Image: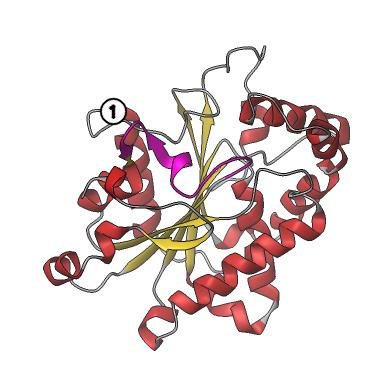
Amino acid sequence: MASSTVNLGGNGLLIVPRVADPAWIAEHGAPSVDIIAVHGLNGGRWSTWSEGNTMWLQDLLPSKLTSARIMTFGYNADVVGNFSTLQVRDHSRKLLSLLRDKRSSEAETIRPIVFLCHSLGGIIVKQALRIATNEDRYNPIASATKGIVFFGTPHRGADLAFWGEMLARLGKACFLRPPKDLIKDLRNNSKTVMDVSEDFRSIVDKYAIVSFYEEDKLHGIDKEVVPKSSALMEVSHEDAIPLEGNHMKICKFSGEQDERFEQVWKAIERVINTGPRRT
């Protein structure tokens, strides 16, 4: 099914049409894992993962991981204020609520989960897992999560000034003409992003972690948007992998011939196959 023939705009949690097709389910059986993709600043649940007419979560990944139900989450990430403390929590709670609805049967509640996150989408997922760990209604999601694959997500920074500068670069990278006050707003919310990442470290040992970091600079910005020093958690079980491409291209693949796609889908497969890490 060609991605371009389907209207996929909007927010919310979408099962990619290819794996939702009854014919696909009849051929491959009930899914054994849920994969959920979460975009970052000024992204979209379809556009973030698309290169030209190829949306790899729909067009490439299902044929490699035939037992996966693949979903993509969209939220309003293109206005000032959307990465404040309250907004991050709201986005995270919406993700949890929609995911709980998609996993309502007994078999679904224990189905393993793998999250894929681009950039600040990783902050949404980290916050969601912290909430799920602490709230009974969402405990099954935390318990079922096997791991997280990050694409250029900031994990660490020396101080608030470092986080502020990095988030300012993110704003410039994600918008051709950043909205008025966006850069200032991102700097002001750097403590939120830093705190969520620091808090997540208390539960990180429960999950397999893959961190892809960008090898290329973005035109007009003199360094990687999220440098390696920040894109790695530096925990012992982290699978740290350099990936060709700048911050905006790190999670876009044009076809199966793109060797970066092979790196990514095999990393996802390793997370699916990893043993339990519960502590």
Q: Is residue 151 above or below residue 117?
A: above
Q: How far from the left and from the top, in percent, is residue 56? A: 33, 42
Image quarter of residue 142: bottom right
Q: How far from the left and from the top, in percent, is residue 44? A: 52, 46
Q: Is residue 176 above or below residue 193?
A: above
Q: Amino acid at mark 1?
A: Asp
Name which residue lies at 22% across and 58% down.
66
Q: Which residue is mark 1?
A: 258
Magenta stretch bounds: 40-54
Q: How far from the left and from the top, in percent, is residue 240? A: 51, 36
Q: How far from the left and from the top, in percent, is residue 95? A: 58, 65
Report the predominant secondary structure element of the magenta stretch: loop
Residue 279 shows in this picture: no
Name which residue lies at 58% across and 70% down.
96
Name which residue lies at 80% across and 51% down.
84
Answer whether residue 49 is magenta in the image.
Answer: yes
Badge 1 element: loop
Residue 18 shows in this picture: yes
Decide if residue 247 is on the left or right side of residue 128: left
Image quarter of residue 170: top right
